[in-house]
Amino acid sequence: MDPNRHTFVAFCDGSALRNGKPNCVAAYACLFPQNEAWNEVKVLNENCISTNNRAEYKAALAAVKRAVMEDPSSRRIVVIFTDSELLTNTMNTYIHKWQRNGWHTMNGGPVKNRDVLEELLRLSNGRVMYRHVQAHTGCQDWESHWNNKADNMARAAARNADRW
């Protein structure tokens, strides 16, 4: 799926070193093949324990925020490509169940990263599609190339967090 004027296409990836630990460093990359000036690579600087999943969600949120900024009338579809099955499953399936269940998982525990997920829902306005892509496939096609680029940039940001 090459981008066209009717869609915003973003490739999102998150990375975390020492995932889920108090000294975790997490970062994300949100890349736009249509306009690389919109690309966003950030280290999470939050007062909570960072995780790779939170970084994945924040990357998707960056894509949606950019779409809202560039197209406030919500005419264009947003297609978010990610190698995170959790992100695609969350946004395509789980989130609606969690909402109906008072933001609790099927096991009864609270949904992690609820703050980011609620903002994603609020800003999405029904125009965001989440597409899963296979990771580390050798850049043999357009999707693989951009997914690999997002992965490399997120990992580099996490590794070099003191420089961001």
Image (cartoon, rainbow, N blue to C red):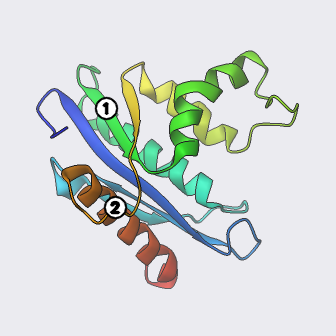
Please identify the quarter of the rendering in which residue 127 is found. top left
Judged from this view, the residue extending furthest toward the right is 108
Residue 126 position within the rendered picture, expressed as x and y whole percent measured from the top left = 42, 18
User: Is residue 25 found left or right of 39 in the rendered image?
Assistant: right
| Other residues around mark 2 within 10 Å, as few (<14) / some (14–19) / many (≥20) | few
Label located before the other in sequence (2 or 1) = 1
Q: Residue at x 28, y 56 (%)?
A: 144
Q: Amino acid at mark 1?
A: Val
How far apart are the two marked residues, 2 and 1, measured between alpha carbons?
Answer: 24 Å
As drawn, 130 above or below 136: above
Quadrant assignment for the C terminus: bottom left
User: Is residue 109 found left or right of 119 in the rendered image?
Assistant: right
Query: For the residue labelled by badge 1, is the local secondary structure a helix, a strand or a loop?
Result: strand
Please name the residue that numbered disc 1 is placed on: 78
As drawn, 154 above or below 161: above
Q: Amino acid at mark 2?
A: Thr
Q: Nearer the viewer, mark 2 or mark 1?
A: 2
- 2 and 1 marks in contact (CB < 8 Å): no
Please name the residue that numbered disc 2 is placed on: 137
Q: Residue at x 47, y 83 (%)?
A: 160
